[in-house]
Image (tube, rainbow, N blue to C red):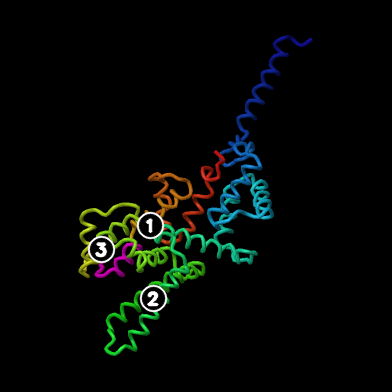
């Protein structure tokens, strides 16, 4: 008959063997940080639909149709509201050129939206009808000055230049839509025309308004002096690391500066989420933006956030 000691020994060896096998088994750490389902599981369909509507209004200037709303909402729900799905849908509204009744295309509607809010921002919402009317006045003035005996060629040249400015302003919407220009050039046309000059009469007001409207800040004393001399005296001055000697060159230097790129990031944060961006948020968007100059990338990165979607 086995003794107690003999019965215990196999039990001990069994425990040792199990412990050894457990130690040799590879442990697996499961990272759940990217699994957003638990966080978004409580988001209602109504809140998702509101997010879709907000995207359409902010990017295209209109509400989504029932079909568009249902389609976008279904895609977001299937993807558990993942960032990649949000990004894809925002890109669709920014770039899709497929024909849509009423819009022509999403890209067309987006370009029109940016053009309209830019005119509201810089030109107090001047209509294209008004701009074309001013062009017509200039055409008449040029014609009669040409046929007038002793017509003033300097004045004719000035009017031709003003007419060109209006044409570039009107063309900026279509050129932006077709990616012939980026937002820098559109803003340049917004501040380099007679309407903007009339709103901000004289060089003193023009300089202050241009800095405030474009860069979202006032010029420093040194910046103001240099800019004023450029515009008022056609004096060659260095500004933002480049040289300018007239109003046209000043507008170009201003809209191609690093300060311009930072200003647009801040402005779109104001428009889309009604707050000042943090330093980290500006830094994240600044370097890509200064390389590609595409405001679409700024909008995309803002519109996919939980803050904008109100999923927080």
Residue on which the image places disc 2: 164
Membership of 244 in magenta stretch: yes
Q: Nearer the viewer, residue 107 or 157?
A: 157
* Nearer to us: label 1 or label 2: 2
Give me the C-alpha separation between circle 3 and circle 1.
Answer: 24 Å
Mark count: 3
Q: Nearer the viewer, residue 181 or 133?
A: 133
Residue located beneath label 3 in the image: 203
Quarter assignment of residue 264: bottom left
Q: Earlier in the sequence, mark 2 or mark 3?
A: 2
Magenta region: which residues?
238-256
Within 10 Å of the Cα at label 2, are there few (<14), some (14-19), or many (20+) other Cα atoms?
A: some
Point 48% across, 46% down: residue? 273
**Nearest to N terminus: mark 3 or mark 1:** 3
Find residue 128 and report its horizontal and vertical position in percent: 47, 68
Contact? badges 1 and 2 (CB < 8 Å): no
Asked whether 280 falls inside the magenta stretch, the response is no
Residue denoted by label 1:
261
């Amino acid at each position: 008959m086995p003794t107690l000691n003999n019965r215990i020994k196999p039990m001990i060896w069994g425990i040792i063997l199990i412990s050894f096998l457990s130690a040799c088994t590879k442990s697996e750490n499961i990272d759940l940080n990217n699994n957003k389902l638990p966080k978004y599981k409580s988001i209602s369909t109504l809140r998702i639909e509101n997010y879709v509507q907000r995207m359409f209004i902010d990017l295209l200037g209109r509400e989504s149709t029932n079909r568009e709303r249902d389609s976008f909402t279904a895609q977001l729900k299937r993807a558990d509201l993942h960032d990649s799905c949000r990004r894809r849908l925002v890109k669709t509204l920014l770039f899709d050129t497929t024909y849509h009744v009423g819009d022509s295309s999403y890209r067309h509607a987006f370009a029109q939206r940016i053009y309209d809010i830019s005119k509201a921002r810089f030109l107090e919402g001047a209509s294209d009808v008004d701009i074309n009317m001013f062009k017509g006045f200039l055409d008449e003035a040029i014609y009669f000055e040409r046929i007038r005996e002793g017509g003033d060629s300097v004045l004719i040249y000035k009017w031709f230049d003003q007419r060109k400015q209006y044409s570039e302003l009107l063309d900026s919407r279509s050129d932006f839509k077709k990616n012939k220009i980026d937002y820098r050039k559109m803003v340049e046309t917004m501040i380099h025309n007679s309407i903007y000059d009339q709103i901000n009469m004289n060089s003193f007001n023009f300089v202050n308004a241009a800095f405030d409207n474009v860069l979202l800040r006032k010029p420093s004393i040194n910046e103001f002096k240099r800019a004023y001399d450029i515009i008022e005296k056609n004096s060659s001055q260095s500004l933002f690391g480049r040289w300018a000697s007239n109003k046209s060159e000043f507008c170009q230097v201003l809209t191609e500066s690093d300060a311009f790129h930072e200003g647009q990031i801040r402005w779109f944060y104001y428009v889309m989420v009604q707050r000042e961006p943090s330093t980290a948020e500006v830094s994240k968007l600044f370097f890509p933006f200064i390389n590609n100059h595409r405001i679409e990338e700024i909008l995309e990165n803002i519109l996919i956030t939980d803050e904008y979607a109100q999923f927080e």
